[in-house]
Each structure stands twice: as structure tokens, then as C-alpha cells.
Image (spheres, grey):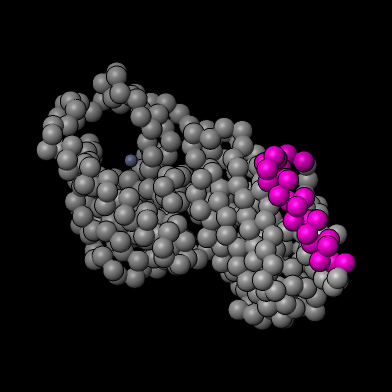
Amino acid sequence: MPTRHATSHQDEPRRRARGGPFTLATVGLAVTTFILACERPPAPLPPLDVEWLPAQPAQGHLFLVRVAVPPEVGMVSAWGEAAGEELYFVLAEGAASGAAGAGSPAASGGSPAASGGSPAASGGSPAAPDSVFESLAAVPIGATDTIDAWVEATYSDGRTQSDSLRIPIVAGEYDHERLTVAPRFGSPPGEEDQARLRREREKAAQVSRDTRMTPRIWTSDMVMPRDSRVTSEFGTGREFNGQISSRHMGLDLAGARGDTVVAAADGIVALVDSFLLAGNIVYLNHGGGLQSSYSHLSEQLVEAGDAVTAGTPIGRVGATGRVTGPHLHWVVRYGGTTVAPRSLLALFR
Ligand SMILES: [Zn+2]
């Protein structure tokens, strides 16, 4: 009898997210499969082996979801959703292109896991990288306790298998600070500025949509856009003029006017513009749902459509837009979810 889960993962809460109709449908599917099995014995579907790293992602952080490819059937694709954002799976780095086919030997890494039908690693440790589909995922900063996710895998014989997950998260550490701002920013924007802000939000949203339509470009090669001091952390609550409270949804890095800003990861320049609050900006589309942006630049060194790699100079530090002094404001988004920028680099260290 095929089962949806033969999970070898730790505790029960790591798994079940949905009951009710989903369970009934699963029972129905199992009965159908059983009837078919009476006529022609199929190879049983291996359990879907889903893991995430780190085991307890933090509020406002990125994490990785990995689905191990069972060598005996091979997996051609996977898709899913976590905390409302679509997941974009690709074979993890170092994977042989034939790894999705049943039992094809891995070309890299010296790991025996993908060859000769030996089972992929399981039981809580990450499977060998040459037999794994991988996607980024994001924990919204406002999430508490757990986020819900599901993954569906399609095997080389056309059968599919899905799993729903409830992923426990840990609280992020976010401070609250009181700021004074220049008087001209203390009052609400006029009609003209509001219209401009709307247009700018739409341009930014279009970049988010484009990242969902672009195959993954980023690799584990990533760098800080500036090698300098953090002057304001991501997620810090802010109080302007004693009344408005908001969160700082980027990471501020120190710099003098003219200092170089580099791309954090491989991607394509999606937007070069001048925004009311963010000043001169560069947006990068890294594909697979991932984008980054760089604000308050004195100069932009790239044009929309340019391909960049991690470390490519894309602009110079400035004080354009709503700022009191030169610095870099760096933002990372997965889909429509803004996350702590350094949580991206932390995944591969
Ligand atoms: Zn900032």
C-alpha cells in the first residue's frame, strides 16, 4: 500500500497541516490505488521526503525547502507554496542534469547517493545535493508560531504525490527606535506625491511579478552589497514625530557618497529609476521569486536588462530620497514578502 507519508522526520507537528476533505480525498486515492494494485502490481510510490533548512526558520527570514529525488522512480518537477508564496523548485546546485531520471549516476560531488538505486539520505539529515530539488521560501515578519506549506512532486512515470506541512518558526529579534525626521517629511504627502508613490509601488510590484516568471538565476555565490557597518537593522520598529510607527524593511549599510555598491547575487537589472522616498534605485531580478533593491544611490552604474553577477558594481552610495545622510538601504524580497537581507547569505554559509 502506498502511503502519503512514511516520514522519518522528527516530531508530529512538523507534518500535518490539513485534515478534513484532504484526508478523505487521500483515502479515496489510496482505495483506487489498491484496486489498481489488484490488477497490476505497481512499484509502490516512495514517501515524499521533504525537509527545510534551518529546521526552525525565523520570523522575517528566508529558508530552503528541499525535496529528495527517489532514485528508484526519479522526479521531474516539484512545486508548492509556503506562507502564501509560490515555491520554485530546481535541482540543487551540483546536481547532474540526469539526476531527475531514475537511477542515473551523479556526475559530481563524489556522493554515492544518486547512483545505483541507493536511497537518498533521509531521517532528518539533508539528502545528498545531487538528488534534491530545492526552493527558497520566506517567513513573513508578522507570522507567529507556524506557517503552512504544501509540496507536490511529479515522478518520471507521471504519478504525483503531495504533502502538506506545518513548519514551526522562531521569533525574530526586532527592536524599536525613535527617530527624528526632516520637517518636510513629517507631514503626509500631497496629492501629486501620492500619485507618484502609487506609480512607484506599481513598478516595484511588477518587478516582483517578473521574478516569479523568471527561472532561477541566483546561485549560492552571494556577497554583501557593501563590506561595511550595519547602521540600521532590518525589522526595527520606527516612530516618526511621536506618532507614525512603521518597520524598517531593509538593512542600512554605512558608506560615504561615491562608495561602490555591488550586486548581492546573480541576476538581471529589472529597474533603474528615481523614487520619491528611496531616491535613485536599482532593482535586481534574481529569478525564482527572488529580488533585491538598492536605494538612495548617488549614481546608477547599470541599465535595465543588464546581466550582473554577485559582486558586479551597480551603483554608488548617496543620500537621494528620504534620508538624512549617505548610506545604502538594501532590500530583499521573496515574491511579495520582504525579508531580512542577511538571511539570504546565511543560507549558504
Ligand atoms: Zn534603510
- Residue drawn at x 62%, y 50% is 150
Nearest the viewer among 190 and 153 is 153
Residue 347, visible in the rendered structure? no
The image shows a total of numbered marks equal to 0
Q: Could you tell me residue 344's position as x and y percent?
A: 50, 52
| Magenta extent | 12-38
Q: Main secondary structure of the magenta part?
A: helix
Q: Is 112 displayed left or right of 91 in the figure?
A: right
- Rendered position, 276 above or below 93: above
**Residue 294 magenta-highlighted:** no
Residue 103: which quarter of the image? bottom right
Q: Could you tell me residue 239's position as x and y percent?
A: 33, 24
Residue 114: which quarter of the image? bottom right
**Residue 21 magenta-highlighted:** yes
- Rendered position, 306 above or below 256: below
- Residue drawn at x 42%, y 39% is 234
- Rendered position, 177 above or below 72: above
Q: Quadrant of the N terminus?
A: bottom right
